[in-house]
Image: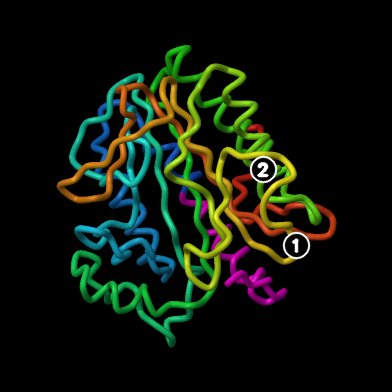
Amino acid sequence: MITLKSAREIEAMDIAGDFLASIHIGLRQIIKPGVDMWEVEEYVRKRCKEENALPLQIGVDGHMMDYPYATCCSLNDEVAHAFPRHYLLKDGDLLKVDMVLSMPLDKSVIDVASLDFNDVAQMKKVTQTYNGGLADSCWAYAVGKASKEVQQLMDVTKEAMYIGIEKAQVGNRIGDIGAAIQAYAEGHGYGVVRDLVGHGVGPTMHEEPMVPNFGTAGRGLRLKEGMVLTIEPMINTGTWEIDTDMKTGWAHKTLDGGLSCQYEHQFVITKDGPVILTSQGEERTY
């Protein structure tokens, strides 16, 4: 069921979005050559405990296992949902960091610092029953100096996201978003992932409607004021096709081994246009 969000719900998601954005901003100083990728996960966990916010990805249902981490850290040819792990980042790597966080909560409601994030079963009981403000955003980071191939892929993917967001106007259709993203990315010779898409947000992290990064203009659900959505193009240097790690059921990689990039913002559709809830500052400037 698609729900239009109230002003109070949007405000709570805006607070969550500001918190999540501050973490992405902090990661700019952490993600460097020689740094252990696991430090990204540790930083997010530390910030959640310090500011009393829930890492809502821990305990998400999976086909083979529940998701056990606060972040997804997808490297180079990994498209999405890869586990954070011990790996020394190298100059030229392309790292995508995705997370879903609650708004900072009053400690009278829950004391996040007392939770054991490594106890996935217990965390699931908390995260799966949470129904307050939340935010979802993925950002791509070039480690050290980006090659021309990596920088162009990042630039095109980020611009594709903004082009899609601009199409999220009252009266437009879902297909208008996907068609605009697809045309821009494919116009640069890239493949647009079909298997993973954007979505509605609230009260849980994945709600209807689904928001594909491909499609036909003028088709699909009509967009309404009060919808909160994510747009999250996953763009590959080669084929759009992906493969899934069948040991865990989570990590997705490009089928041909090419690079993949993803950017994701969460936003609300207003009568005056889309308003980004996970903004890190002036858009298109970072």
Q: CA distance from mark 2 to mark 1?
A: 14 Å
Identify which residue, 135 or 205, lies in the foreground: 205
- Would residue 257 be found to the left or right of residue 132 on screen? left
Residue occupying image coordinates x 52% and y 39%: 263
The residue drawn where x is 73% and y is 57% is 222
Q: Amino acid at mark 2?
A: Ile
| Picture quadrant where residue 257 is located | top left
Residue under pointer 2: 177
Outermost residue toward the right in this view: 272
Question: Is 149 within the magenta?
Answer: no
- Answer few, some or many: residues within 10 Å of disc 2's Cα (few below 14, many 20 plus, some between 14 and 19): many
State the extent of the magenta-drawn residues as a range. 1-23
Q: Secondary structure at mark 2?
A: helix
The residue identified by callout 1 is 224
The location of residue 175, given as percent across then percent down, is: 66, 45
Predominant secondary structure, magenta span: helix
